[in-house]
Amino acid sequence: MSKHTPVQSVQYRGDHLLLLDQHELPHKMDFIRIETTEQLWNAIHALQVRGAPAIGIAAAFGLSLWANQQKEESDLRTFTHQLKIQRNYLSSARPTAVNLCWALDRVMQSIQYAETVQDAIQLIEIEALTIQREDEATCQQIGEYALSLFQPGDHILTICNPGAIATARYGTALAPFYLAQERGVPLSVYACETRPLLQGSRLTTWELQQAGVDVTLITDNMAAHTIRTKKISAIIVGCDRIAANGDTANKIGTFGLALQAKALGIPFYVASPLSTIDLDTPSGESIPIEERHPEEVTHLAGRRIAPEGIKVYNPAFDVTPHEYISAIITEKGIIFGSYRENLAIIKNQKNLL
Ligand code: MRU
């Protein structure tokens, strides 16, 4: 089987960043050029770059772009103070995915022993590149573990886009399908379209189709029926933040899928890099849930599909309580329960490395 190389959604060029414009997919593969933190904030906020790991990677590079523009600055304290302002600004672009703050904080920590501004600028760039490189290896390892849970011929359902373009490569919940494809293991994916912004139909089907993976699109309200009629053997999803007790925030609609999995007796898996596990958030109740503009619901492809003046509730994410999660698949192994204890163990192991 041939190895498909998916397009990299975040590309760092030192003085600018190229972002695959995820608004334009699947029609066009356009890249937007980012030179300032303001442009990057807008691109993250508008979901031109999206998916928890990808926004963390982009934000880390955003600090590097900014740092590279400070070569005239000679005072390290002034530089660090201004960098912190940029970090806080970028962290406000979206609230739910913890990877955004995680990556920004990693970059901040990387300069703690810098002695000059020049040192700091170099360290920031190295750290941002490392975050991106590590994410690729992380996703591949998540894919290996996830694949061990599936049998050849399985039909698996997913939601949103937890794929290559939401990460450095491979994706989280889509990684096992890339690996299976590379190895000639037959797996079929059913992708929920993911209203209101259609990450499933626009992005997941696009990237899996390009890789030659067998993928079928359904609308979100077809999931329960499809689980029965198409013999879905498991659901696998990505995530934006896992609280210390295992409660998991992911794209709106995920909790409903977990309930359906429980009712219909199939496993519900969450694929998560350790960077998405937030031990400082005790439970799902404390996860900030982004609410987005009503127009995302009242309009489809620029056309109004609801009456003028209608009230709209538009949460972008929901929280699946940990008791509905069969396993959390990380790059360090699979956790099958006792999430509070096991998440702390696995996360701290990583910190020791
Ligand atoms: O609003 P989005 O498109 O950024 O939401 C993305 C998701 O919910 C993904 O499932 C999640 O970030 C996992 S990405 C590997």
Image (spheres, rainbow, N blue to C red):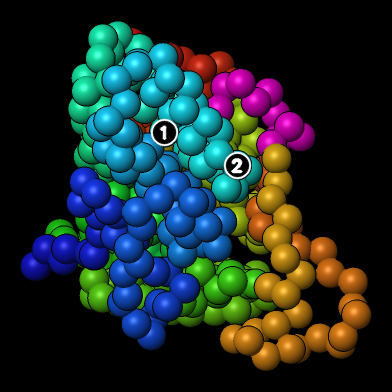
Q: Residue at x 63, y 72 (%)?
A: 195
Q: Position of residue 323 (x, y in %)?
A: 67, 37
Q: How many marks do you count on the picture?
A: 2
Residue 303 appears in view: yes
Q: Which image quadrant: the N terminus?
A: bottom left
- Mark 1–mark 2 contact, CB under 8 Å? no
The residue tagged 2 is 92
Residue 142 appears in view: no
> Which element carries disc 2, helix, strand or loop?
loop
Q: Nearer the N terminus, badge 1 or badge 2?
A: 2
Q: Is residue 62 left or right of residue 42?
A: left
Q: Residue at x 60, y 42 (%)?
A: 92
Instruction: Categorize mark 1 by other alpha carbons within 10 Å: few (<14), some (14-19), many (20+).
Output: many
Q: Residue at x 27, y 38 (%)?
A: 68
The residue tagged 1 is 103
Instruction: Categorize mark 2 by other alpha carbons within 10 Å: few (<14), some (14-19), many (20+).
Output: few
Up the image or down, 301 lies above or below 269; here it is below
Is residue 281 one of those drawn in magenta?
A: yes
Q: Amino acid at mark 1?
A: Ala
Q: Position of residue 352 (x, y in %)?
A: 33, 10
Q: Position of residue 158 (x, y in %)?
A: 49, 62
Q: Nearer the viewer, residue 262 or 5?
A: 5
> Which element carries disc 1, helix, strand or loop?
helix
Q: Is residue 193 left or right of residue 351?
A: right
Up the image or down, 270 lies above or below 264; here it is above
Q: Residue at x 67, y 58 (%)?
A: 316
Q: Position of residue 61 (x, y in %)?
A: 33, 42
- The magenta stretch is 276-287
